[in-house]
Amino acid sequence: MANNNILEVENLNVHFHTDEGIVRALNGVDFKVERGEAVGIVGESGCGKSVTSTSVMRLLPGVGEIAAGTIKYYDKNKKQHDIINLKADGEHMRSIRGPEMSMIFQEPMTAFSPVHTIGNQIMEKLLYHEDIDKDEARRKALELLKKVGISKPEQRIDEYPFQYSGGMRQRAMIAMGLACEPQLLIADEPTTALDVTIQAQVLKLIKKMQADYNLSLILITHDLGVIAHMVDYVNVMYLGRVVESGPVEEIFDNPAHPYTQDLLKSIPRMTGNEGKLASIEGAVPDAYSLPKGCPFHTRCRKKIGEVCERAYPERQEISADHYVNCYLHQDLGDK
Amino acid sequence: MSKFIMHRLLFMVVTLVIISILSFIIIQLPPGDYLTSYITQLRSMGTDVSDEQIEYLREQYGLDDPVYVQYFKWIGNFLTGDMGFSFSWNRPVNELVWERLGLTLVISISSLLFTWIVAFPIGIYTALRQNSLSDYFFTFLSFIGVATPNFLLALVLMYVSFKYFGINVGGLFSPEYADAAWGIGKITDLLQHLWIPVVVVGTAGTAGLVRIMRANLLDELGKPYVITAKSKGIPNYKVILKYPVRIALNPFISTLGWQLPKLISGSTITAVVLSLPTTGPLLLDALKSQDMYLAGSFIMLLSVLTVIGTFISDILLALVDPRIRYV
Amino acid sequence: MAKENNQNENYENEIYAASQKELIWMRFKKHKLAMAAGIVLIIMYALAIFAPFFSAQDPHQRRVSYKEAPPHQLHFEDADGNFSLRPMIYPYSKEVDMETFEDIYTEDTSKPTPIKFFVEGFEYEVMGLFETDIHLFGTGDENRPVFIFGADSLGRDLFARIIYGARISLSIGLIGVAVSLFLGILIGGIGGYFGGKIDLFIQRMIELVRSIPQLPLWMGLSAALPSSWSAIQVYLAITIILSLMSWTSLARVVRGRFLSLREEEFVIAARLMGRNPLEIIFIHMLPSFLSHIIASLTLAIPGMILGETALSFLGIGLQAPVISWGVLLQKAQNLYTIANAPWLMLPGLFVIITVLAFNFLGDGIRDAADPYSK
């Protein structure tokens, strides 16, 4: 069977060693991305979305450690790379970062160096990975800036990030992400820091670029509204685990996990007059001391009982490609 | 950019005017006018001073004019290079100051370079190896460096080199070169003596800069743009050198403004201890013997040096940091 | 009704203030180095305040036969090797080297002299309250004085002189800082409170003062002090000269805080109620960043101490017979003296320890007051 996946993440565990103790940021994350597919990762802040993406890029900060799991990446020639076993700053990993996978960050102001021109920062990537001279790199950078809709790129290329507006900075960030024509683009909350009106433009741009470059996309967001229009497949994360995953229509039409259901209810809708906007009771538990069993049981409205506190529920396929980890969907007859 | 330079230039001129007023006040501070005390001094030594001479001097320094006229006369003369007359040396002040000022400048600039060359790698090293044994070692050392007064360090260095190596490290020249004309030999001799005052003057600044560099770099290392650069596949060391180090470098230039006054202050006192032929000892003597024209001119000139240095550092900072340039 | 509200507010304020203080204290206690520095400083100030009690000799008493005598070594074993917990010294016998004419001091082991504690010595007043002649330690024998730090060129006890000198050197820092605190808060506060043109002007003024080389100006000003002035007058004048240049860093801290604080609601409320600016600055704004001020103050003291030391060292600050660390270090100015009597540099060690301690303490307070601004 020909494997059409570009990324396979299995049982990913990431720990952070801090002064206060070990934080278990990821506790067995599983997901995959098919070639050319757009996959969303959703969850509240602190659930491990960004840790997942930085782990895939091997850009975890010094205190973070991948404790267990595998990350497999298949490159342009379908050659498999065992990301976990590569040296984070080694040549092999660096040859993947850039030409193979690329990342767009949340805060375009701070994600660019303030004292280098936008052009310099885009060209740096091109010059490092491709065997071209400065003029050629500049020409390519100009082309990219034009592509992402920056007006007067010849002038803009020599400007500094603080001379760009927020939306333009994010466009430049996308241009930089697209340099070296990567296969997989990871967008980490790409619109959170932007004005609502600009958000839509930037999302459209990402969608267009995905089609134009035939990219695989991982879109990380806390905003289910964004996910609906952008991705084919959704992974819902809670406290370092994927609790539900499925095709985007399935998730929106038949959410199976109480957490997903609550998340969906908390999206404001223009239509219905459902009255008060729902919110999820309580706050995300402290990551230093995770609850035993299903981590959501402390806030779950549909908690069955003691079983939810005993062990983490197994993954169940409830319809085609739709998985959920919840005792509500398991046969508890003999337990 | 040109607007920025104009702005700084204007500020420089205002600063200089105020400093000149301060220097003039210092000249005026001792009770009585110095000419009278000078003449008394001369007469007590048996030198005859004619009334015309006195009249001429009174006229030249405008001692009978109101204070502000005296100030304008003094500053006017100063700008044309006439800094008045040193009564204790019996020579015009400008004959006395230039060589000493030159050597002061040599020591201050060498100390600055020393400060940078030492503080830069140590700052980076300690930031990258945060909380390691060597980090603690250098941090401790830099605390001591900040806390040790210049002159004490000079004393200890003098003591150690005399006690254990039998050399006297004072002065800037060996006796045979002290009064010789400038030439290769004298310059080599100078360089051989120079390092001690440079180390002494530079230590406190180095220690301070190491701490600033370390703190800044630690701040910058955690910034998102570092991750962005790494996500491009650039090797760590290149990322660190190009981005955070480059930005953490700004304090090297932005602190120049207050480093210079400190270095010049430091070299003043160090020069007294190590008996260097720079402005320090001469200024001290002038102050002690109330040779006020000499003292005032020195204070004025040292301040001018500092202000010019600060101006240059402002321009440099604008060159390296676009955020300032485009304001 | 209004009164009740007010009381309520006060009550809440009180609770808040207390917990804030506790938090700061908790964080400060974690800072081991700062705690140690604090203890060192307490000891230093105790030594200074009770200097006569801690000195074995009168710091002004000259003893011709002890000129530049080296520090006494404390022995716990006598010449026969008998151990005793009570330390003892051997008095010096002096010879003159006929070639170099230097004094050579050798220990006379035939006259072991035990150190006694709470011993009688010269008379002194305790804080102007009562007279006593009890000292922490000494030999109790006027003819066999103990010099734990050696003696200076006039045969005076260096240890006594150092702790007497601490009275001047340590207090000049405090008073100087108080003066610059006043200037800094006033000027920085005005800039930060009013903002705009006034702030710009004050910022420029701060920049200007900072760009003047301190030491030459200090030298110029202190050399101009009339020689007829009394020691106290010179002391005060030097303090003011030092503070004239040092208020800038405090003013910057205050200004920055004020700029952010003046947008806060409680300040706007006070302004709307028609309080005058000085009242608002000192009653409403200042208390809200007191801990920052204390930290900056602590960090400003070393500069003062070093300034006094430098000026006195150069002979244009305080003059003998006043004792300060700088005055003491004057004796250690030439190579000949320090080569023969290196212990004359000991006051310098006290300067370094004090400055280090203030730096550590200040760092600790700053970190405790605001863990996020490093």
Image (tube, rainbow, N blue to C red):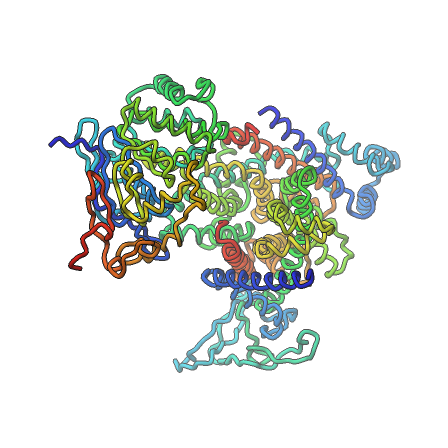
- Indicate left or right for C320 with A272 as reference: right
Q: Tell me if residue A234 can be seen.
A: yes
Q: Position of residue B7 (x, y in %)?
A: 64, 29
Q: Position of residue B85 (x, y in %)?
A: 75, 36
Quadrant placement of the C terminus of chain A: bottom left
Q: Which of C254 and C226 lies nearest the eye of the viewer?
A: C254
Residue located farthest toward the left when viewing the structure as drawn: A1
Q: Position of residue B231 (x, y in %)?
A: 33, 34
**Total marks placed:** 0
Q: Which of C183 and A290 lies nearest the eye of the viewer?
A: A290
Which of the 4 quarters of the picture holds residue B294?
top right
Residue at figure coordinates x 50%, y 41% from the top left: B193
Q: Which of C281 and A238 lies nearest the eye of the viewer?
A: A238
Residue at figure coordinates x 64%, y 26% from the top left: B6
- Indicate left or right for A331 with C101 as reference: left
Q: Tell me if residue B245 can be seen.
A: no
- Indicate left or right for B38 with B245 as reference: right
Q: Position of residue B153 (x, y in %)?
A: 52, 51
- Indicate left or right for B115 with A224 as reference: right
Residue located farthest toward the front when viewing the structure as drawn: A273
Q: Is residue C284 above or below residue C165?
A: above
Which of the 4 quarters of the picture holds residue A204?
top left
Q: Is residue A105 above or below residue A175?
A: below
Quadrant placement of the N terminus of chain A: top left
Q: Which of B196 and A56 lies nearest the eye of the viewer?
A: A56
